[in-house]
Amino acid sequence: MQIAKVRGTVVSTHKEPTLRGVKLLLVQFIDEEGQLLPKYEVAGDQVGAGLDEWVLISRGSAARQMEGSEKRPIDAMVVAIIDTVNVENRLLYSKKEQYR
């Protein structure tokens, strides 16, 4: 899994039928220092993530392990919305602090 920040949404009115009902997000990956990396990816979202939230991304075949996603042609899936990230006893991210 990787940590990423939701940067936007991707809207597609014509798509593979198994992707109907799947919200698509544009996410930007984050390094261990909390810095945004120059790498973006489109990920499916079934947990309800919103703009600027930090999320956990599952990639590859693991992205299709969620119930109902086994046959979807998807390479990345948002599997969790992050509340906090601590590295070496240092708070790197707090959702609570972000929205103050």
Image (cartoon, rainbow, N blue to C red):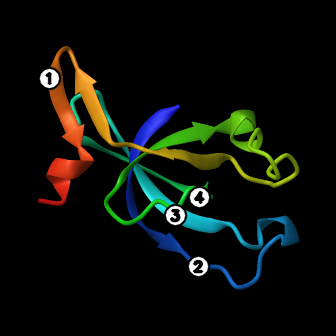
Q: Quadrant of the C terminus?
A: bottom left
> Helix, strand, or loop for circle 1?
strand
In percent of the image, x 20 and y 14: which residue is there?
88
**Mark 3 and mark 1 in contact (Cβ < 8 Å)?**
no
**Residue denoted by label 3:** 25
Q: Nearer the viewer, residue 71 or 91?
A: 91
Is label 1 or label 3 in front?
A: 1
In percent of the image, x 59 and y 58: which residue is there?
45
Crowding near the residue tagged with mark 1, few <14, some 14–19, many ≥20 C-alpha atoms within 10 Å: few
Give the amino acid at mark 1: Arg
Give the amino acid at mark 2: Val
Is label 2 or label 1 in front?
A: 1
Q: Nearer the viewer, residue 53 or 2?
A: 53
**Residue denoted by label 2:** 11
Residue 83 horizontal side relative to residue 61, left or right: left
Q: Which comes before the other along the chain, label 4 or label 1? A: 4
**Residue denoted by label 1:** 90
**Residue denoted by label 4:** 45
